[in-house]
């Protein structure tokens, strides 16, 4: 059975197409169906009230469905919400689909088969939305519970990530793991180059909001078992365990670098673009024994070159010299 109160927003500049979609959804039992004739109008509506499902035409003037999807994902970041995006398209081909999925699109409906595909696809989105919203609620509760453990001094209360002490513990654990089991560690230092300027320009309240947004973006870009920590107001850190040291390369973290630098952050002061640098240090058991502080310091020395080059700056931890 469909959820009659599922919030659906239909975005199409063709009134006839919108009317046909609206009629089909109403007949299927959906009561909360809104309409927008442009991507800009859709964004205004979503800022006032999020939708669970967004049905949008891929080809629209001024802003197409892919750009709209990117903006919706930015809204989702700030609202602890997930919008299931379905694009209506006449395009075909694997390359087209790969690009769209990479931009955050969840599903497609072919215009040639819309009468057959529309309601079943929305039914599927309906089921997934219930699960997604429940998971988001559980994540919010988990974040609150983690923050309540601050007295253990391992959690950063602003972002819910680990704090510097947590980072030290996880680095030590990771070094012990590669010593006993093999594999390698990648340690990434992530710096916000223009942090001081933004803080001076907009104030502490805005800056805390921005740091929270950066933390959420990082959580979306890394693997579930990776370790994230906030070191201070300008720096975050990431620890990831890999099987082969060769994987600890700038290309492996290109998506992370682009996700911070190329996608703006929605804030109370509007969309803010950051300049973030990433230094990367990789090591395996050959570099042990190693004090975690040496690894942290090595990454810090590499970070200015990342700011200057606009790329991930990588190095391997040298092997200890024999006594």
Image (cartoon, rainbow, N blue to C red):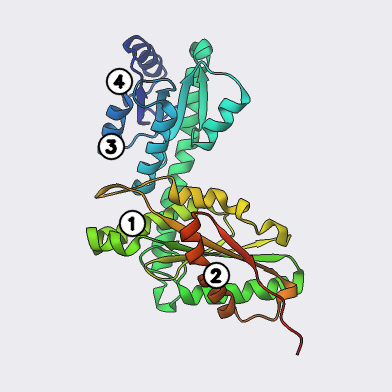
Describe residue 95's horizontal placement relative to residue 48 as left or right. right
How far is mark 1 from mark 2, CA to CA? 24 Å
How far is mark 2 from mark 3, CA to CA? 43 Å
Task: Kindly give the residue lying farthest to the front in the view shown.
Answer: 308
Residue depicted at 35% across the width and 60% down the height: 194
Residue where numbered disc 2 is placed: 299
Q: Which mark is residue 37?
A: 4
- Residue 111: image location, x then y, percent: 49, 14
Of label 1 and label 4, which has the lower sequence position? 4
Q: Nearer the viewer, mark 1 or mark 2?
A: 2
Of label 4 and label 2, which has the lower sequence position? 4
Res 1 visible? no
Q: Nearer the viewer, mark 4 or mark 3?
A: 4
Q: Which mark is residue 275?
A: none
How far is mark 4 from mark 2, CA to CA? 49 Å
Describe residue 50's horizontal placement relative to residue 180 as left or right. left
Residue where numbered disc 3 is placed: 49
How far is mark 1 from mark 4, CA to CA? 31 Å
Of label 4 and label 3, which has the lower sequence position? 4
Q: Secondary structure at mark 1?
A: helix
Looking at the picture, does residue 96 appear above or below residue 238?
above
């Amino acid at each position: 059975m469909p959820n009659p109160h599922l919030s659906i927003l239909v975005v199409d500049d063709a009134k006839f197409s919108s009317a046909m979609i609206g009629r089909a959804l109403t007949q299927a039992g959906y009561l909360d169906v809104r309409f927008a004739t442009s991507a800009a109008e859709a964004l205004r509506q979503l800022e006032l009230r999020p939708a669970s499902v967004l049905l949008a035409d891929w080809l629209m003037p001024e802003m197409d469905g892919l750009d709209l999807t990117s903006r919706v994902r930015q809204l989702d970041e700030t609202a602890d919400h997930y919008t299931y995006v379905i694009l209506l398209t006449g395009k075909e081909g694997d390359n087209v689909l790969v690009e769209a999925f990479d931009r955050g699109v969840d599903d497609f409906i072919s215009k040639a088969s819309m009468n057959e595909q529309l309601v079943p696809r929305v039914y599927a989105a309906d089921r997934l939305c219930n699960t997604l919203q429940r998971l988001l609620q559980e994540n919010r509760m988990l974040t609150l519970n983690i923050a309540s453990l601050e007295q253990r001094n391992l959690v950063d209360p602003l972002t819910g990530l680990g704090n510097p002490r947590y980072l030290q513990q996880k680095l030590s654990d990771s070094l012990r793991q590669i010593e006993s089991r093999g594999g390698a560690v990648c340690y990434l230092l992530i710096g916000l180059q223009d942090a001081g300027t933004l803080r001076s320009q907009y104030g502490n309240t805005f800056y805390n909001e921005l740091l929270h947004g950066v933390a959420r973006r990082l959580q979306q870009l890394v693997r579930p078992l990776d370790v994230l920590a906030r070191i201070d107001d300008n720096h975050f850190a990431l620890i990831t365990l890999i099987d082969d040291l060769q994987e600890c390369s700038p290309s492996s973290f290109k998506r992370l670098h682009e996700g911070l630098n190329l996608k703006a952050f929605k804030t109370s002061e509007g969309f803010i673009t950051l300049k973030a640098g990433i230094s990367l240090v990789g090591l395996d058991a050959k570099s042990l024994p190693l004090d975690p502080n040496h690894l942290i310091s090595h990454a810090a020395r590499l970070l200015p070159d990342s700011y200057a080059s606009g790329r991930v700056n990588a190095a391997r931890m040298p092997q200890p010299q024999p006594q």
